[in-house]
Image (cartoon, rainbow, N blue to C red):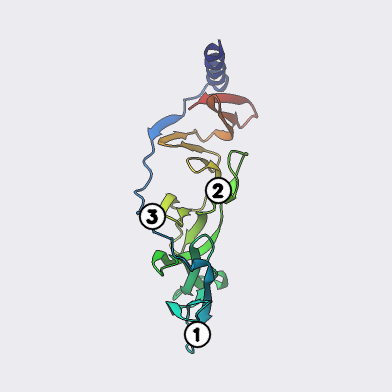
Amino acid sequence: MKALYYLLITLLAGSCFGQKKPSFSVYKPPEMKPSFDLSIKNEENLIPFHNAEGKWGYLDANTDSIVIAPKYAGAELFDCGIAQISQLNPHPDNYSETNLIGFINSKGEEIFPPAFTSVSNIEIIGSRVSADSLYYLKWVSCGDGTFGVINVKTGGWIIKLPKEKRILFYDRHHFIVDDQIWYAGDKKLAMPDWLKIEWAYFSPHCIRVQNKSGASGIYSW
C-alpha cells in the first residue's frame, strides 16, 4: 500500500506541473587521491614559527626542533592532523585575495598546494550528521573563478563548478546544488528551471519540489 501511495503522489505531482520530467544521469565523483597517514606522534605539539625572512614553518613544541621547514607566508595550528597554510598571491584581484590558501598534513606534505582565494566550512541541512563529522569538507573558491567543495583529508574534490553556487549537505554523499540539482551517491537528479528543490526525504527516497506558482510535488530518487 505504501508503494502505491508514493507512486500516486509522484503521478499527481507530474500531472500538477504539466511539464517535462527532470533528467536523470549517473554522477561519477572525481577520482580521489590516497589518504595520507596522519599518525605522527607529535602532531598536536607542532606549532607555527617564522624565520628571520618572515617565512613560516612548524616546530616541535617539546624539543624546539624544526619539523616542517619555514617556506610559507602564513601558517595556522594543526587540527585533526591538518593545517592551513598560505602564500602571497602574485596577482590578487582585490584586498581579500592577498593570500592563496592550501593545506598540509603533519609530515609537511601538501594535500592541496596554496591555490584557494577563500576557504570556509560547508553548509549542512537537516540532522543526519553533525558538523564535526564533515570537518574535512571545505567550501573553496579559486582565482580563476572556479568554486566547489574539497576533502582536505584525501586531497580530492567532492564537486567542482565553473562559478559560485550554493551547496547544502545532508551528509557526505547527499547534497543539493543551487536548489536545482540533487546528488545522491552515484545518482544526479537535475530539475528543470521552473522547479526548485525544497527538501529531501531518505525514507522513502524522494525529494519535495516547488514550481514558481508555489505548487509542491514529489519526485522519487
Packing grade of label 3 (10 A; few <14, some 14-19, many >=20) is few
For discs 1 and 2, the disc positioned in front in the rendered view:
2
**Residue farthest toward the right in the current orientation of the protein:** 214
Q: How many marks?
A: 3
Q: What is the x, y in percent for residue 201?
A: 57, 29
Q: Tell me the distance, in whole angstroms, between the alpha carbons under discs 1 and 3.
A: 31 Å
187 relative to 137 in the view: left or right: left
Residue 166 in view, yes or no: no
Of residues 65 and 127, the one drawn nearer to the viewer in this rendering: 65
Q: What is the x, y in percent for residue 116?
A: 47, 64
Question: What residue type is disc 1 on?
Answer: Gly
Of residues 177 and 103, the one drawn nearer to the viewer in this rendering: 103
Of residues 205 and 8, the one drawn nearer to the viewer in this rendering: 205
**Residue farthest toward the bottom in the current orientation of the protein:** 52
Question: What residue type is disc 3 on?
Answer: Ser
Report which residue position mark 3 lands on: 35
130 relative to 90 in the view: left or right: right
Report which residue position mark 2 lands on: 133
Of residues 135 and 101, the one drawn nearer to the viewer in this rendering: 135
Question: What residue type is disc 2 on?
Answer: Ser
Helix, strand or loop at disc 1? Answer: loop
Residue 129 in view, yes or no: yes
Q: Earlier in the sequence, mark 1 or mark 2?
A: 1
Instruction: Say above or below: 115 vs 196.
Output: below
Residue placed at 41% from the left, 54% from the top? 154
Q: Earlier in the sequence, mark 2 or mark 3?
A: 3
Helix, strand or loop at disc 3? Answer: loop
Q: Quadrant of the N terminus?
A: top right
Q: Earlier in the sequence, mark 1 or mark 3?
A: 3
Residue placed at 53% from the left, 20% from the top? 14
Helix, strand or loop at disc 2? Answer: helix
Report which residue position mark 1 lands on: 54
